[in-house]
Amino acid sequence: MNKYIVAWLASACVLIISMVIIGGITRLTQSGLSMVKWEPVTGIIPPLTEEKWEAEFQLYQNYPEFRKINPSMNLNEFKSIYFWEYLHRLIGRGIGIFFIIPFIIFYVKKRISPWLMKRLRIMFLIGIIQGFMGWFMVTSGLVDNPHVSHYRLAIHFLLAVGLVGYIYWVILDFTDTAGHNPDMILKKWVRLSVVFTGLIVLQMFWGAMMAGLKAGYAWNTFPAMNGQWLPEGLFEKSPWWINFFQTNMTVQFIHRSTGMLLAAAAIGLWLMSLRELHGIQKRDVFYIFTLTLIQVIAGIFTLILFIPVWLAVLHQLLAVILFLTSLRMIRNFHIMSGSRVSKPH
């Protein structure tokens, strides 16, 4: 039965990642504020007649995005942006149904152990918070400013990534193939892996902040920012620390800098692994090294090509894959260092 539970959880991961991808497309196509109501149940049915489409469009016209940004938008253009937000929400509902129905089946058949039940409750809780945060994010763009809060967007994104990461960690508990050898001294590599993963999370946070602020639509040169290595105006707001979160130039500068730091760290880990590691250990580090460099290159081209949708979405997807790969690296080093890992029973 474990293989069915693993397939269930793995499919949930795929669905959540697909929702992250659709969410990225929704943001990049300026579609996120097209649905101005939150109807968790009845909202699953889209407008099916021309009259209902007109009513939905008229409702949209009452909100800031239409009045301030899209006053000349026609119904067909509205339908195109409505599609992406509707699909995003539909997948969100689908994930909930996909989680609940197999859970009921496994529960009735008494296939869910206390160990797994505890973790499923955590997944369910994160999922509920994630759904609420999605709507809380949208509401921030329905008042006066026709843009969602970049803080809420960053939290919404990191909750999704965190949920995928947690589910993936539970899957690894079921499918562990790393060798156990308490004599191996790999504590240092556990710490290095945790630090590297922390850098990935920071990079994703500032990437989400950059997306929310639309900071990628300026300074589209690399490696210097429009000819300046240390641009003037990084700390133009007071107090100085607020620039790290609210000044477009500063947020982009941090995202660039953290990306270069990640690339340097990945190269350093790979060079160290050539001297200190063997087999599966060296393989994990090589995967991290390769994915990090691909991700950094994708980020650079996303910027200099002025944020093409397909490349920006790929950049976001690679960030999630890199994060999950780093979790696997942490876990493998943790096991191979002789540490205990909670196992399903």
Image (cartoon, rainbow, N blue to C red):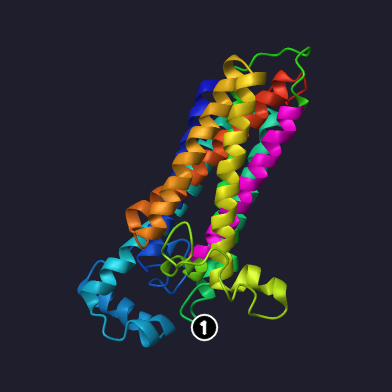
Rendered view: 231 above or below 172: below
Q: Dot 1 corresponds to which residue?
A: 143
Residue toward you, 23 or 221: 221
Q: Where does the image place residue 295, in percent across and percent down from the top left?
A: 46, 44
Image height of 313 relative to 225, above or below: above
Circle 1 residues within 10 Å: few <14, some 14–19, many ≥20 = few
At a point 68% along the width and 25% down the height, the residue shown is 333
Q: Residue 114: percent from the left, percent from the top?
A: 71, 30
The magenta stretch spans residue 210? yes
Boundaries of the magenta span: 188-211
Q: Is the magenta stretch mostly helix, strand or loop?
A: helix
318 with respect to 182 (left or right): left
Decide whether residue 316 is among the magenta residues.
no
Q: Where is residue 7 in the image (x, y as percent from the top left)?
A: 48, 28
Q: Report if residue 299 is visible in the image.
A: yes
Q: Which amino acid does label 1 sit on?
A: Val
Q: Quadrant of the C terminus?
A: top right
- When asked about the image quadrant of residue 32, the answer is bottom left
Left/right placement of residue 145 relative to residue 110 reads left
